[in-house]
Image (cartoon, rainbow, N blue to C red):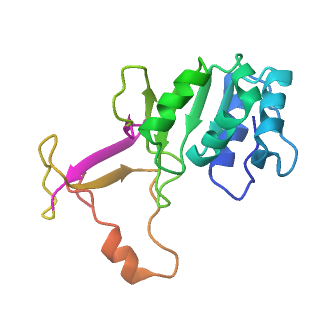
Amino acid sequence: LQKTPSSFDVSVWEFFWPLITGAALVVARPEGHKDPAYLAGLIQEQGITTVHFVPSMLQMFLEEPSAAGCLGLRRVMCSGEALPDELAQRFRAVLPAELHNLYGPTEASVDVTAGQVTETTDRVSIGRPVWNTRTYVLDAALRPVPPGVAGELYLAGVQLARGYLGRPGLTAERFTADPFGEAG
């Protein structure tokens, strides 16, 4: 289901997912992404199997009584905001579909990590790196921290931006060389 305005990066995902998997691309009416009842009806009428929501919109969608009738959904992807544990539990109570949490900061092309949220998931995580992506949790000296120790998330891979347009100082501050990558 393509429902996100094309100025948002998720729209790329919505346009191309069905096309690369051989599915039909259903395009929602303009502003339809803001109407949970309309979306539930469209999902049911068109037999949509995969949809993306930002978590705040997923919350509104699940509050719509007709959302429980979207039994043809196979997978729901969430990104753009943190996915609260309580919302994941509510999702599982309403829909039998798979729930996936995706993460991608502004500095990356759409998503850099993904993970399925299962019934045994106690806490929603950002998942594991997608193809051609590396993730590190590092301390202030750019050393890996042990599991369970707080650190800062560093990303590496071809999908990262090269910097901030017209902001060389901020680019130098925020875009560091991959301490574990090839030299150069």
Image check: 46 left or right of 121? Answer: right
Of residues 20 and 105, the one drawn nearer to the viewer in this rendering: 105
Is 130 a magenta residue?
Answer: yes
Residue 38: give x, y in percent of width and height.
83, 37
The residue that appears at 75% across and 34% down in the rendered structure is: 1
Q: Position of residue 73 (x, y in %)?
A: 68, 21
Q: Position of residue 86 (x, y in %)?
A: 46, 36
For residue 61, which quarter of the picture? top right
Q: 58 and 1: which one is in front?
A: 58
- Which residues lie in the magenta part? 125-139
Taking the spot 37% from the left edge, 83% from the top edge, the residue there is 169
Q: Is residue 72 above or below residue 66?
A: above
Count of numbered labels shown in the rendering: 0
Report the residue at 14% width, 49% height from top: 144
* Left or right of residue 15: residue 146: left
Quadrant the C terminus occupies? bottom left
Residue 120 sits above or below residue 170 on the image = above
Q: In this picture, is 82 found above or below 179?
A: above
* Residue 12 appears in the figure: yes
Q: Quadrant of residue 168?
A: bottom left
Q: Residue at x 43, y 22 (%)?
A: 118
Figure check: 20 above or below 139: above
Q: In the rendered structure, does residue 37 fall within the stretch colored magenta? A: no
The image quadrant that residue 2 belongs to is top right
Is residue 180 among the parts visible in the rendering? Answer: no
